[in-house]
Image: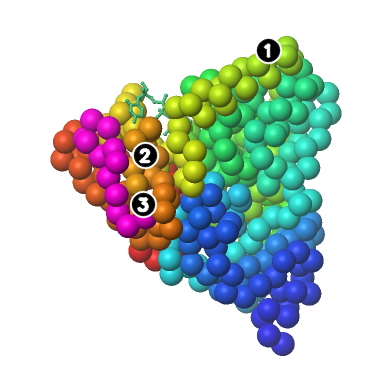
Amino acid sequence: MALIDDLRRIASGRVAQDEPMAGYTTLGVGGPADYFVEVMSEDELSSLMKYVTENGLEWMIIGDGANLLISDKGIRGIVIRLGEEFSKIEVDGMRITAGSSARISKVADVAAKNDLSGLEGVGTVPGSVGGAIVMNAGTHRGYIDEVTHSVRVVTYTGEKRVLSKAECGFTYRNSRFQWDRTMIITYAVFNMRRGDGAAIQEHLDSVRKHRAETQPQGKSAGCFFKNPTGLSAGKLIEGAGCKGWREGGAVVSGIHGNFIMNADNATATDLYMLAERVRDQVREVHGIELEYEVRLIGEW
Ligand code: EPU
């Protein structure tokens, strides 16, 4: 029995071979995944992980691709995506349970409607709940770890587990899920505080408006580099004179230096080469080593 047939028996979502990844990332680049599998429930995910592990297959999970730079050579093995079922958001008193593929901004809006506070900081950031947990996403108004109570996962062997906040290993823009690739986040549970819904919504709207004014629109992965402690990567890049730099179809935004954009049919290589040139220049001018915030996937 061919691998693809096995995958189709296990998963009820889209299952495909040589699936181009460009359509699954906000940067709009990325070569083909050998196999692409969309699972529609924790049970399907559990069966899939068991199968993948028993057969020694390589795998990775993709969220809404808002923070990924996938190589033009694509991804070997199986790319797993969590389907519609995982975008549910449920409110129970002060607690919100959100599926891993729900947009974090949508969760923040639901919180506001229910007069629940705590997700204002992260609710203005692009990306999914799962992605936000992995990256410990947020802004100076707060990071997602502050309200995270627990996280539901399926492990690589197909076991369902609940991790407490402490077990998630959150630090600045980081969590255990960045190095521990043995589990996939399916749901997150947030412990919220009572708040004034109208004020929260007003805050969300005003930050989103400010963001739309100070950050470029178009194909990007948000900020490309982490802010070095106490500094702004965007400011450093601007100071190094990189704004407007180009490489093929990639460009360093003139609006915000930490946005490296797919302006005109860029390849992943264009973006990567431009990012490396920016790093070299920042190192030379400021003596500071910028670290990637976007996740580089595949061969470079
Ligand atoms: N600045 C410049 N030149 C630039 C960009 C910024 O001088 O080209 C200056 C700004 O004027 C400001 C300072 O640098 O004084 C900080 O800039 P900004 O307020 O835009 O915030 P940031 O530190 O660059 C962080 C997050 C963003 C988030 C914003 C707003 C990181 C790496 N970035 O950016 O997150 O949207 O705050 O809350 O922490 C992302 O997650 O992808 C992302 C873009």
Amino acid, disc 1: Ala
Q: In this view, does 219 lie above or below 207?
A: below
Q: Is residue 205 above or below residue 224?
A: above
Q: Are discs 3 and 1 less than 8 Å apart at CB?
A: no
Image label count = 3
Q: Distance between the residues labelled 3 and 1?
A: 39 Å
Q: Tag 1 or tag 2, which sits nearer the N-term?
A: 1
Label 3 sits on residue: 250
Query: Which quadrant does the C terminus fall into?
Result: bottom left
Amino acid, disc 3: Ala
Amino acid, disc 2: Ser
> Mark 3, residues whose alpha carbon is within 10 Å: few (<14), some, or many (≥20)?
many
Label 2 sits on residue: 253
Query: Which quadrant does the N terminus fall into?
Result: bottom right
Q: Is mark 3 on a helix, strand or loop?
A: strand
Q: Is residue 254 magenta?
A: no
Label 1 sits on residue: 199
Q: Nearer the viewer, residue 267 or 142?
A: 267
Ligand 1 closer than 8 Å to label 2 CB: yes
Q: Give the range drawn in magenta.
A: 238-249
Q: Is residue 20 left or right of residue 230?
A: right
Answer whether residue 44 is visible to the viewer in this image: yes
Q: Which residue lies furthest to the left in this view?
A: 284
Q: What element carries label 2?
A: loop
Ligand 1 closer than 8 Å to label 1 CB: no
Q: Tag 1 or tag 3, which sits nearer the N-term?
A: 1
Q: How far apart are marks 2 and 3 (CA)?
A: 9 Å
Image point (61%, 17%), residue name:
203
Q: How far apart are marks 2 and 1 (CA)?
A: 32 Å
